[in-house]
Amino acid sequence: MNIRRFHTFDSLALRDYRLLWMGQLSTSLGQWMDQTSRSWLIYQLTDSPLQLGLVSAIRGAPLLFFGVIAGVVADRYGRKAQLIIAQVVNAILNAVLATLVLTGRIEVWHVYVTGFLAGTVQAFQQPARQALINDLVGEKHLMNAVALNSAALNLSRSVGPAICGVIIEAFGVDISYYIQAVMYAFATIWTGQIHLPAKAAGYLESVNQSMFASAKEGFAYIAKNKTILALMVLALAPILLGMPYTSLMPVFAIDVLHGDAETQGLLLTMVGIGAVIGALIIASLGRQQGNGRLMISGAAGFGLSLVAFSQSKVLGMAMTFTFLAGLSNSGYTSQNQTMIQMLTPAKLRGRVLGVYFLNRGLMPLGSLLAGALASGLGGPWAVTIMGGSCCLLAIAVAVFSRELWNMNSVPVIVEESADRGP
């Protein structure tokens, strides 16, 4: 077997993308550690399950409120600068919170205010970082780079909470937040070393246009481009309708599979493993990017996997289908984001990705929907409906967007990004 036929890590050979990827891994680990630390801290301070949900909602709300604005800013003032500023603010917030805990001055409102601010700077990081990928690697390596980025995100989701739990148990939540601050500091150093290609500066939009007009231009582009609109529907709707199934895992672990917290951990671990493998499979496709049928089939497979999982009565089967759900979701979302980036002109890419990253803010709304369905119909039927909806949505996109379904490769219709080869 000739291993050179595999292209799994091609884009990591590019120095500037490698620096960006290391920053992504570091900040993503920090974000998942923050989620674990903040939940632990608020429960220690209040002993209130209600406030556990509330602090997560407060941290997630800015992702929904500021995503579009962040995309506008990225297109107007520069993606690298925006990313550096956001990471520096994140490091400061974590250091402040750690010091408040260490000195015994921590109060509940501190947790909420820093959580809202952390969510806000995260909203500004995402479109800037993703738009930088295309600036640094060009269309040739884009799908590989996006897929490796997805692998970093899913690896962080799988191991971040566990690492954080060990740190809190051994040293305390204050040390956890100091470590997170250091991780953001390293990410900032790496981002600062990135050399942007000369063309990247030429993509910046004129600041003569108002912020509102800039945002409107991004929405107008999505609305009038039927393929981009179909891709955006596939990006956002399953996050609202399907992904919140993970919030119902305690129901399946305890009531359906008659297990405990370890059972829940196994199910969620299989989701993470599947997601990492799915991303690596897409990364290994090399330059074979932009296959509409493969992407839509992955979205339908995600929905079918949820339906099968919802009706599983044996742990082994349930773990198999959560693995497949993670694999298919990660695979199709990597392709989806690649196609959106390749079909979007560089000067609009930040704004379009700002809309794309509303998906993170939709998760809490989807969790509320999932909880309501589970309360009325039970967990299994709730997830059956959610998975079935995702599958039907994918079929509808295939029927009504024949151009996307028949697309074998993305046409080169956007400006060429500088290809910074090894």
Image: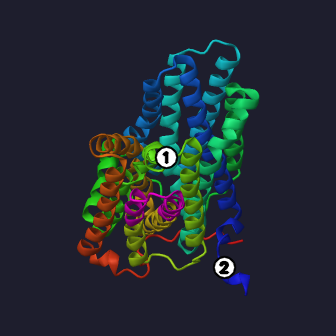
Report the magenta residues as a range.
304-325
Magenta stretch: includes residue 273: no
The answer to whether any part of residue 236 appears in the image is yes
219 above or below 92?
below
Residue 400: quarter of image: bottom left
Residue 206: % across, % down:
41, 50
Q: Which residue is mark 2?
A: 6
Of pointers 1 and 2, the one earlier in the residue sequence: 2
Residue drawn at (68%, 20%) of the image: 99
Quadrant position of the C terminus in the picture: bottom right
Residue drawn at (71%, 62%) of the image: 15
The answer to whether any part of residue 132 appears in the image is no
User: Alpha-carbon distance for marks 1 and 2?
Assistant: 42 Å
Residue 242: % across, % down:
37, 54
Residue drawn at (25%, 69%) of the image: 396
Q: Which residue is mark 1?
A: 258
Q: Are marks 1 and 2 in contact (CB under 8 Å)?
A: no
Mark in the foreground, 1 or 2 = 1
Residue 150: quarter of image: bottom right
Amino acid type, residue under disc 2 in the picture: Phe
Quadrant position of the N terminus in the picture: bottom right
* Residue 389 or residue 92, whichever sits in front: 389
8 above or below 199?
below
Amino acid type, residue under disc 1 in the picture: His
Residue drawn at (50%, 23%) of the image: 113
What is the chief secondary structure element of the magenta stretch? helix
* Residue 421 or residue 409, whichever sits in front: 409
Under tag 2, what secondary structure?
A: loop
